Every structure is written in C-alpha cells, then in structure tokens.
Image: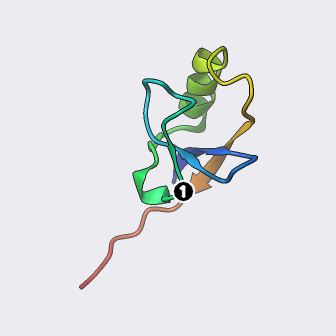
Amino acid sequence: MRYVIKDVDTGHYVRGESAWNRRRDADISKAKLFHRKADALAHIERWKHWARAFRYAVVPVQITEAHP
C-alpha cells in the first residue's frame, strides 16, 4: 500500500516538493508516492504555510503492475 496527497477541493494530486501548492495534477500516475501515511502527513505539515488556501487529504492507493 502506498499513499498520495489529494487536494480535497479540486481532486488534484500533489506532484512534488518545490512550489508545493502549484505542483498538482489530475493524473494520479504523476502523484508523489509515500511509503508510509506518516510521511505524507509530515509532508503536509512541513509545507502547510505554502498551502493555506488548500485542503489536503492523504489517500491510500494500491500499486498494480500493467501487463501487455
């Protein structure tokens, strides 16, 4: 199980670290993956001063392999 951070209002997923509140994308495959929920929550806490206008949730995702 992995975790991603999702913008509650727009449904976009957080893509990266820098300019955090602007680096969001609707495509979940571009989302930054976290191995632990605690890491994702710490990421939100660390950058919350940049993201005051946004509400975020940590969402679990299951990684599956695509077969041709």
Image position of 40 with respect to 19: above or below: below
Residue closer to the observer: 23 or 58 = 23
Percent x, y for residue 3? 55, 46
Residue sitting at x 42%, y 58% = 29
The residue indicated by pointer 1 is 26
Q: Position of residue 33 (x, y in %)?
A: 45, 44
Say left or right for 52 vs 35: right
Secondary structure beneath label 1: loop
Res 52 → quadrant = top right
Rendering coords of residue 18 (x, y %): 43, 24
Give the image's coloring scheme: rainbow
Left or right? Give the position of 30 relative to 13.
left
Question: x%, y% of residue 7?
Answer: 67, 44
Q: Nearer the viewer, residue 48 or 59?
A: 48
Quadrant where the C terminus is found in the figure: bottom left
Residue at image coords 41%, 69%? 64
